[in-house]
């Protein structure tokens, strides 16, 4: 659920406006995103938008030129580069500021964090299947937190260094191969930086590859809670590959998927 909150919510919905969500879904995704403990949505979106706008430069909060570990995790614990702050403050965040769900989460982040990140995951196993509180806290709070942080970290580190670049050879983000399964559907990163507003964050859909966030958005779409799902036409993708991509790698990528 925390993965769904980060990927469907903070990433595809709020950072990229790749689809629209009704109030109930926005509340659900905000609760799930709080569960992840990866900063509030407002800061997550600001960091991510500045990452896309200035990818792999000093203004990118997790500039992969500063090394694998910096991009993976170090950037969270180190002081931000002055350019990240400068460019981040220039971003247009008016759409985020206009969403009462995001602003409510930001205002009450600490109590919400304690509740959704800590208390609820810890007590559910105790109440429903008699787990010991210690194991529940270790497994469902701490291990889960570290696991999801690494899933997200791999997208910023590994997927900015290794893999195919079929859609745009001029940029560093790449289509990861086997490791992308660890990234739970966010490892199609050359595509994602080429078409960031695609709700699937991949050329492929949830029935073609392992992409639980796309499957979740499709599910919410079928329920009527998610709408206006955005996706480029096949002709737009083909044109981009022809213009700046690598057709051989594009074919290889499709067949290996
Ligand atoms: Zn990226
Ligand atoms: Zn993105």
Image (cartoon, rainbow, N blue to C red):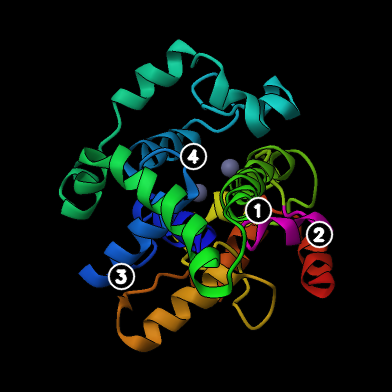
Q: Which residue is mark 3?
A: 25
Mark 1 beta carbon near ligand 2 (under 8 Å): no
Task: Please say if 36 is above or below 205.
Answer: above
Q: Secondary structure at mark 2?
A: helix
Mark with earlier residue (3, 1): 3
In contact (CB < 8 Å): disc 2 and disc 4: no
Residue 50 in magenta? no
Q: Which residue is mark 1?
A: 135
Q: Nearer the viewer, residue 82 or 194?
A: 82
- For discs 4 and 3, the disc positioned in front in the rendered view: 3
Circle 3: is it few (<14), some (14-19), or many (20+) Cα within 10 Å? some
Residue 52 is tagged as 4
Q: Which residues are magenta?
A: 175-186
Task: Please say if 8 is above or below 141.
Answer: below
Gap in angstroms between the C-alphas marked 1 and 4: 39 Å
Mark 3 beta carbon near ligand 2 (under 8 Å): no
Mark 4 beta carbon near ligand 2 (under 8 Å): yes
Q: Which residue is mark 2?
A: 249
Residue 257, given in percent of the width and then of the height, sits at 78, 72
Gap in angstroms between the C-alphas marked 1 and 2: 46 Å
Q: Secondary structure at mark 1?
A: helix
- For discs 3 and 1, the disc positioned in front in the rendered view: 1
């Amino acid at each position: 659920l925390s993965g769904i909150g980060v990927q469907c919510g903070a990433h595809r919905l709020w950072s990229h406006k790749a689809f629209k969500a009704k109030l109930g879904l926005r509340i659900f995704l905000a609760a799930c995103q709080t569960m992840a403990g990866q900063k509030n949505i407002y800061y997550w979106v600001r960091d991510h938008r500045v990452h896309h706008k200035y990818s792999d430069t000093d203004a990118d909060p997790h500039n992969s030129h500063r090394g694998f570990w910096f991009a993976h995790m170090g950037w969270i614990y180190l002081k931000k580069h002055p350019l990240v702050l400068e460019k981040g403050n220039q971003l247009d965040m008016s759409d985020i500021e206009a969403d009462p769900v995001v602003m409510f989460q930001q205002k009450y982040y600490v109590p919400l964090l304690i509740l959704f990140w800590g208390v609820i995951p810890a007590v559910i196993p105790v109440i429903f299947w008699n787990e010991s509180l210690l194991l529940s806290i270790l497994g469902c709070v701490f291990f889960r937190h570290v696991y999801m942080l690494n899933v997200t970290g791999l997208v910023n580190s590994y997927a900015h260094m290794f893999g195919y670049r079929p859609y745009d050879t001029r940029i560093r983000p790449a289509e990861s191969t086997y490791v992308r399964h660890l990234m739970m559907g966010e490892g199609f990163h050359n595509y994602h930086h080429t078409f960031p507003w695609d709700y699937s964050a991949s050329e492929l859909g949830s029935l073609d590859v392992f992409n639980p966030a796309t499957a979740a958005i499709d599910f919410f779409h079928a329920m009527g809670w998610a709408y206006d799902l955005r996706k480029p036409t096949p002709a737009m993708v083909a044109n981009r590959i022809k213009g700046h991509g690598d057709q051989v790698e594009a074919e290889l990528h499709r067949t290996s998927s």
